[in-house]
Image: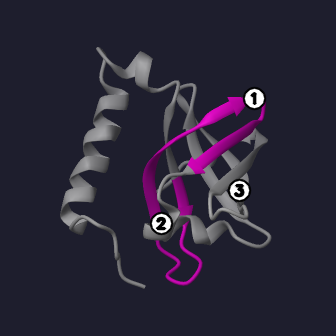
Amino acid sequence: MRYKGPLPKRVTGRFNAWMVGLRSSPRWGRWVSGRLTVVTYTGRRSGRSFSTPVAYERAADVVTIRVAMPQRKLWWRNFTGEGGPMALHLDGSERAGHGVARVDGKGRVTITVRLDESPAPKSR
């Protein structure tokens, strides 16, 4: 399925790259990294690896991601049903987890990620 968002794909790609850079900057990173992480997952149909920056909330080993404008995004659909594995960059390292997406009665999407105890394997 192709991107059908409100902005051209190259604009969203540049914005995502800028957000990842902001998160890792020495000046702003400490403020941004408490609310912004990078999610890495494998597409169900394509088998390709994808990374995208997302806002999150964390309580111990449970991370909650609220998907903004879910009707215009496709990536979260990889975690419907039984969910799927993902890696998140938290506290300076990659953490593996299992994410499950839920859609409420108003169409809002929340992904709940239960983090594994061990760190995520290094991506190639």
How much space separates mark 3 and mark 1, taking CA atoms?
15 Å
Q: Residue at x 35, y 28 (%)?
A: 24
Q: Residue at x 72, y 61 (%)?
A: 104
How much space separates mark 3 and mark 2, taking CA atoms?
15 Å
Amino acid type at circle 3 is: Gly
Q: In the picture provided, is 111 more to the left or to the right than 69? A: right
**Label 1: how many Cα within 10 Å (few below 14, some 14–19, many 20+):** few
Q: Position of residue 81 (x, y in %)?
A: 77, 73
- Image depth: mark 2 or mark 1 in front: 1
Amino acid type at circle 1 is: Ala
Disc 2 target residue: 49
Magenta segment main secondary structure: strand
- Image depth: mark 3 or mark 2 in front: 3
Disc 1 target residue: 59
Q: Position of residue 54 (x, y in %)?
A: 48, 45
Q: Residue at x 49, y 82 (%)?
A: 46
Q: From which residue to which does the magenta span run?
A: 40-66
